[in-house]
Amino acid sequence: MTASFDWQGAPALVNAEKIKKRGAWYVAEYRILNMSKWLGAIFAFGLGNPILYLASIGIGLGALVDSNTGGVDGVSYLVFLAPALLASAAIQTTMDEAMFPTMAGFVWWKLFWAMNATALTGKQIARGVMIAALIRSSLTVTMYWLVLVLFGAVDLASGLTVIPSALFCGWGFGSVILAISAFIKEDDGFFAVIGRFVIAPMFMFSGTFYPLENLPSLLQYVGWISPLWHATDIGRVLMYGREISTGLFVTHFAYLLVMGVIGSWVAGWQYTRRLSE
Amino acid sequence: MISGVKSTNNAMGRLLHLMSDSQLHNGVPSMISARNLTKEYGDFTAVDHISFEVPRGEAFGLLGPNGAGKSTTMRMIAATLARTDGELAILGKEPNAQGPEIRAHLGVVPQQDNLDSELKVHENLMIYGRYFGLSRKFLKGKIDELLDFAQLQDKRDSKVNELSGGMKRRLTIARALINEPEILMLDEPTTGLDPQARHILWDRLFRLKELGVTLILTTHYMDEAEQLCDRLIVMDKGRIMAEGTPANLIREYSSREVLEVRFGSNKNAEVAEQIQGIGERIDVLPDRILVYAESGEGALEELTRRGLEPLTSLVRRSSLEDVFLRLTGRSLVE
């Protein structure tokens, strides 16, 4: 073995300006390579989840609901449920892909310090994690939507608006999770807390399985806070033409936009701060 | 075109500025220049007004006990930790303002390997190269070269989990070389490695030095510092206690030879009084007495002449370890 080097040196080789522009994408590239190790699981969950949900609740429970009430919100139960399932898939996937990589980067394997030792900045790392999360969730959402099409819960043309808006909702909530995860110092059951006290109630009280108006008014507030309710309502408008006021429709987007903007900003700030402590 | 000319002018300007700042070390512009560099965490001063220069191509060591401020200094040089006070220029740039530009030209080997254990060996290198914006085509060749260099060619498709400690260390070093850095920073590069692995690493680091790479390293091993460092500083409690080449430091802070004698634990203190005056300096330890002298044999003869008969005696050359212990003390600081 004779290790010989063709050594140009970093000044000739590395273009710092280019990294300034594309850094976040290099991080996303890493995240996608990492995800590709779990491609089988991504597809299995991506397809398995909607099929199981639609078969059991959508069709099983739906038959019961439809035969007793003639549908919900003027459509069959399956059609009513579909936007909620899609929205929760988008939100859950983006959340996972924001939370776990952040834990791996800061707590489990300290990967972010290795990234930050290069020309990459904390902000770029945060942004790259989010870009990859959205790429992953666009895959999941598209698969989910295809299954919905196959089950006849939604028509083909809706994809153009439904998929981007679901991703937007995922970004809004995912950004907040990205920011929160970046503050976690130790892996002491944070996920269990998030799962039990945030995700589960959110799923129950966001008008997922029945219209939010059916709840007593106090519990309706939970729905209004919940990003999932806003996302679900957007989906219902786009997928089966649920009638809501323009003001409310815009409010849904504005709510998630504010979450996304604040979440992204705090995430970038905390990533930078933590790496330079 | 104009912007190209401009940026060249800027580079020249910066160089001239650098030279006029007299940041020169024996006529070579400094790779690193620190003046009164300070880092405080609240009331605690981790690095306390230290100054040093490192010229291009030098292997520069930071020595000191745990908590001396070595790693903090390393992180400030690596442009990932902001200083509290003082001046710092790395590659002629200001780290607070130009961190990413500086880091683009550095290679960093952290104290603890932070490789991605879910990726394969070659993927770890590829992805790190991508962080520097290097093309996949370039990286393919580069990775081959680095795997040869790190003697990891037959592990290229292994997962990082499957590597031994020494292999992981070599991979981390290979990773730090992917951008052909001007300065390679190594924080305790051989801690936890067996002697074979250490010697392989020393050989590799020596080759990098021959390529003109500036090496900055911290270590707890004095033999390693003697082997690798052209020049070093000994730090304690955030301050520089001494600076120089290993040979000069030994000359300055120790004698040529050391005589180590044992009289049995309970007799050492008693004997110590009778030894006074032999050699240049005496160090009484619980288990043995060290006599620092120009000639160890001479000191031993003098000892026998005074009627003292040690249980065991050993004459050796003075080492950097003697300097280190003299400067930073023998008591443990936890």
Image: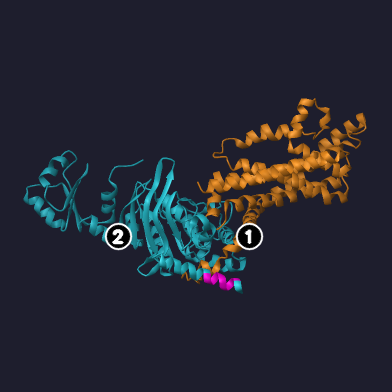
Chain colours: A orange, B cyan
Decide which of A222, A69 is in the foreground and name it. A222
Residue B199 lies in magenta, yes or no? no
Quadrant for the N terminus of chain B, please: bottom right
Q: Which residue is mark 1?
A: A21
In the image, is residue A178 above or below residue A13?
A: above
Residue plotted at (52% across, 56% down): B97
In the image, is residue A88 above or below residue A7?
A: above
Q: In terms of secondary structure, where does tag 2 sit? A: helix
Three-letter amino acid code of the residue under disc 2: Pro
- Give coordinates of residue A45: x percent, y percent: 73, 45
Decide which of B97, A146 is in the foreground and name it. B97
- Give coordinates of residue B105: x percent, y percent: 51, 63
The alpha-carbon separation of the residues under discs 2 and 1 comes to 44 Å
Quadrant for the C terminus of chain B, please: top left
Residue B207 appears anywhere in the view: no
Three-letter amino acid code of the residue under disc 1: Lys
Q: Main secondary structure of the magenta part?
A: helix
In the image, is residue B329 above or below residue A65?
A: below
In the image: residue A138, left or right of residue B102: right
Q: Chain of mark 2?
A: B
Residue B270 appears anywhere in the view: yes
Please determine if labels 2 and 1 lie on a single subunit.
no
Q: Which residue is mark 2?
A: B246
- Give coordinates of residue A160: x percent, y percent: 83, 52
Residue plotted at (60% across, 46% down): A102
Chain part drawn in magenta: B3-9
Q: Residues within 10 Å of mark 1 (few under 14, many from 20)?
A: few
